[in-house]
């Protein structure tokens, strides 16, 4: 007989909390036609949310022996651990949850809560409503305000839920065991991605922040775990990525004794983050976590570090939760917008430069409408090429390492630079040589979310403190100006860009320019391409055309080892999109152990490893300064394809272009991760330079 579960007010009116009754109306969602042919019954179980096995026993029960078997199962489930927490004591219930009713003191409105058997039998008052769909929520102004007791780890995980965290990256440590225990109860709502090294975990959290615009969350243990994670924090800082790193810490009675793995994280992370703090009282967990999330996404986005002493996580307190964080960004004023439009109308050789963090797909679409309406030559900064579709006729290149010399000269010749988002740091300005310090020759309009960045190096003629989305939404509504004055300027800039896209003659049977050109044709527009650092990226950044927001994941910090964990985060966030990681041999092995994480989650990522047997970037500079005196830059590598197979992935090695194309097609069709090792020419050190000597 089909069974529907309903709530009963109190078990003393029933036999062991069970009651069977006939349903007079069809259950919600059951068609009348089906109801007419079925015998529907209610099973009233006030103390539990029944398992499928319990419902199955109830449906089949007819004799007294059947109901005795059902009662045994019922009592077993009441004694078993549960994934649900108690709304009163907030601890994992020793049995399945009871649904309690009460009437608010002021409004006399019935509300429902979820609690464990102990709290239910004791008649403890409650104030939180359960989180099941369709249940009435309490009126806090009228409900009894008895706040539940919770362990620190539980309070922290509840805060993460409130801040809509759906993925947590970590390498587990005994310093935050109460958090892991609380996460055990949230496995359906919050994915825990266990990584193989803290640097990989931090990179994944950083990439998650880039992809979603929400803070990437990472947990690492104290001491060595924190130092390993530092590379991800530094990348989040330089890339302006929202991220919250939680670090285990020794208990309060051990502080300042240089206890086992003790570090003062305020001094360690101080300059790399927006805020570093240690939560020394369990009552302050909701407050400080809320501040961390607000700070990570507001103004210039960036990383926040919170240290978690062991005794705080295991302490118990009655503390209310905070609400979800809300990003705060400045908006451009109407006077600044009118000033910008007047300067643009007077310009003859303008350039729009896009970069920095804090962008969204909507902001990119708005800035595109503004750029196209005014026919502005548009440039992206280092590893921000996905902010603007590279195929559009007014995209003219990127200001990065190995910049197109003609584009660099065009920056010098411009009479108006509208920089939206970038800090205008070393890479974007050619080592601070494209613009004079502190007052550029060009008229400079600098838009940035962080007021502290405006005027830091360059004095702008018009500084505008605004978030990217806020500025883009405002500027795209400005009436367009007459762009005829820079028609030829735009045409020449685009021609220079297209000429720079043409690869030089191939060097060897496996040429990286041809590989990138094939990827450009083969991958769909929504594909995500990740990379770390090294000379191999020069081919990717020059010849690949990014076609949409967050199709590029790469560290502006220049961190090696970024590509592999970033690809894993990308595939976890967007399993429906193709993800390709391009890595050098040195770059891959800095976080190659995370291939085990990709295999564990059966992530269909294609890893392309360019093996030239050297640290290519260092070798290039070495040959320029000390020709023929190679020292410390040669590598002895493993068989990367065999290494991939040892992890459980598919692996192939290729040494010519046709073999690569065939291997890549097989990789795209594979069920799980694939690694393709490219045996590249070690003499081809950049797209235009060779180590060959006459």
Image (cartoon, grey):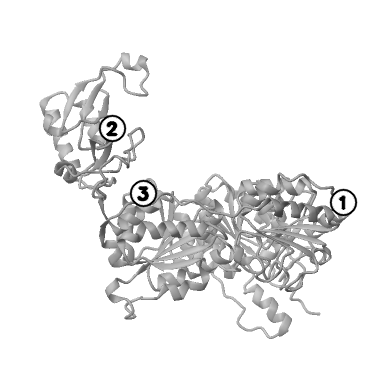
Task: Indicate left or right for 234 with 521 as reference.
Answer: left
- Is residue 623 rendered to the left or right of residue 250? right
- For the residues labelled 1 and 2, the Cα–Cα distance comes to 69 Å
Q: Earlier in the sequence, mark 3 or mark 1?
A: 3
Question: Closer to us: mark 1 or mark 2?
Answer: 2
Label 3 secondary element: loop
The residue beneath circle 3 is 187
Q: Earlier in the sequence, mark 1 or mark 2?
A: 2
Q: Position of residue 535 (x, y in %)?
A: 67, 69
Residue at (71, 73) in percent of width and height: 431
Marks 3 and 1, how far apart in space? 57 Å
> Which of the pair 677/335 is nearer the observer?
335
Q: Position of residue 453 (x, y in %)?
A: 63, 66
- The residue mark sitting in front, 3 or 2, is 2
How many tags in the picture?
Answer: 3
- Quadrant of the rendering where the C terminus is positioned: bottom right
Mark 3 crowd level (few <14, some 14–19, many ≥20, 10 Å Cα): few
Pointer 1: residues within 10 angstroms few (<14), some, or many (20+)?
A: some
Is the residue under label 1 in contact with that under label 3 (CB below 8 Å)?
no
Task: Please indicate, yes or no, whether residue 640 appears anywhere in the rendered image.
Answer: yes
Position of the N terminus by quadrant: top left
Q: 371 or 559: which is nearer to us? A: 371
Q: Secondary structure at mark 2?
A: loop
Q: Which mark is residue 63?
A: none
Q: Indicate which disc residue 109 carries.
A: 2
**Circles 1 and 2 in contact, beta carbons < 8 Å:** no
Instruction: Quote the CA–CA distance across marks 3 and 2.
Output: 33 Å
Q: Quadrant of residue 419?
A: bottom right
For this view, does 80 lie left or right of residue 456? left
Q: Residue at x 58, y 70 (%)?
A: 586
Q: Earlier in the sequence, mark 3 or mark 2?
A: 2
């Amino acid at each position: 007989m089909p069974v529907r579960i309903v709530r009963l007010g109190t078990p003393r009116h029933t036999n062991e909390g069970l009651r069977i009754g006939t349903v007079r109306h069809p259950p919600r969602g059951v068609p009348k036609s089906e109801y007419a042919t079925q015998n529907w019954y209610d099973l009233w179980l006030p103390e539990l949310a029944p398992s499928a096995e319990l419902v199955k026993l109830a449906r089949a029960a007819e004799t007294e022996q059947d109901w005795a078997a059902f009662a045994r199962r019922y009592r077993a489930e009441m004694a078993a651990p549960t994934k649900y927490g108690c709304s009163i004591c907030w601890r994992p219930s020793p049995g399945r949850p009871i649904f309690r009713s009460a009437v608010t003191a002021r409004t006399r409105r019935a509300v429902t809560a979820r609690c464990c058997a102990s709290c239910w039998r004791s008649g403890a008052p409650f104030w939180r409503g359960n989180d099941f769909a369709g249940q009435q929520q309490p009126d806090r102004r009228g409900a009894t305000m008895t706040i539940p007791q919770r362990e620190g780890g539980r309070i922290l995980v509840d805060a993460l839920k409130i801040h809509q965290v759906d993925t947590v990256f970590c390498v587990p440590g005994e310093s935050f065991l109460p958090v892991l225990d609380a996460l055990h109860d949230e496995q359906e709502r919050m994915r825990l991605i266990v990584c193989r090294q803290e640097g990989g975990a931090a990179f994944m959290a950083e990439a998650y922040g880039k992809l979603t615009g929400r803070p990437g969350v990472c947990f690492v243990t104290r001491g060595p775990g924190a130092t390993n994670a530092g590379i991800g924090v530094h990348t989040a800082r330089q890339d302006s990525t929202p991220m919250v790193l939680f670090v285990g810490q020794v208990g309060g009675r051990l502080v300042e004794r240089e206890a086992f793995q003790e570090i003062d994280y305020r001094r360690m992370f101080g300059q790399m983050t927006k805020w570093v703090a240690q939560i020394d009282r369990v009552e302050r967990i909701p407050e400080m976590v809320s501040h961390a999330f607000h700070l990570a996404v507001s103004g210039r986005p960036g990383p926040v570090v919170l240290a978690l002493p062991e005794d705080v996580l295991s302490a118990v307190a009655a503390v209310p939760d905070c609400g979800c964080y809300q990003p705060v960004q400045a908006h451009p004023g109407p006077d600044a917008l009118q000033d910008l439009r007047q300067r643009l109308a007077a310009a003859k050789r303008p350039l729009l430069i896009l970069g920095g963090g804090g962008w969204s797909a909507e902001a990119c679409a708005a800035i595109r409408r503004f750029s196209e309406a005014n026919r502005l030559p548009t440039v992206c900064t280092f590893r921000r090429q996905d902010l603007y579709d590279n195929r559009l006729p007014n995209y003219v290149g990127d200001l990065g390492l190995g910049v197109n010399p003609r584009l660099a000269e065009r920056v010098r010749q411009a009479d108006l630079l509208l920089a939206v988002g970038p800090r205008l740091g070393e890479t974007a300005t050619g080592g601070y040589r494209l613009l004079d310090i502190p007052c550029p020759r060009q008229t400079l309009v600098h838009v940035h979310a962080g007021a502290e960045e405006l005027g830091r190096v360059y004095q702008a003629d018009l500084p505008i403190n605004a978030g990217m989305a806020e500025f883009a939404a405002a500027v795209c509504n400005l009436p367009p100006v007459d762009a005829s004055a820079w028609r030829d300027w735009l045409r020449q800039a685009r021609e220079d860009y297209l000429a720079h896209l043409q690869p030089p003659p191939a060097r060897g049977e496996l040429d990286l320019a041809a590989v990138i050109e094939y990827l450009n044709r083969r991958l769909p527009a929504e594909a995500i391409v990740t990379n770390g650092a090294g000379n191999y990226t020069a081919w990717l950044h020059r010849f690949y055309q990014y076609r949409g927001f967050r199709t590029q994941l790469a560290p502006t910090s220049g961190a090696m080892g970024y590509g592999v964990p970033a690809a894993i985060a990308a595939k976890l966030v967007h399993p429906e999109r193709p993800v390709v990681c391009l890595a050098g041999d040195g770059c891959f092995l800095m976080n190659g152990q995370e291939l085990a994480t990709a295999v564990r989650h059966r992530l269909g990522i294609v890893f392309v490893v360019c093996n030239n047997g050297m640290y290519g970037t260092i070798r290039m500079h070495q040959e320029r300064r000390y020709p023929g005196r190679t020292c410390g830059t040669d590598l002895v590598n493993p068989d990367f394809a065999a290494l991939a197979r040892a992890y459980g992935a598919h692996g192939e090695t290729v040494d010519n272009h046709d073999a690569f194309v065939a291997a890549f097609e097989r990789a795209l069709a594979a069920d799980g991760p694939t690694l393709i090792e490219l045996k590249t020419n070690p003499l081809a050190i950049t797209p235009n330079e060779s180590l060959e000597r006459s």
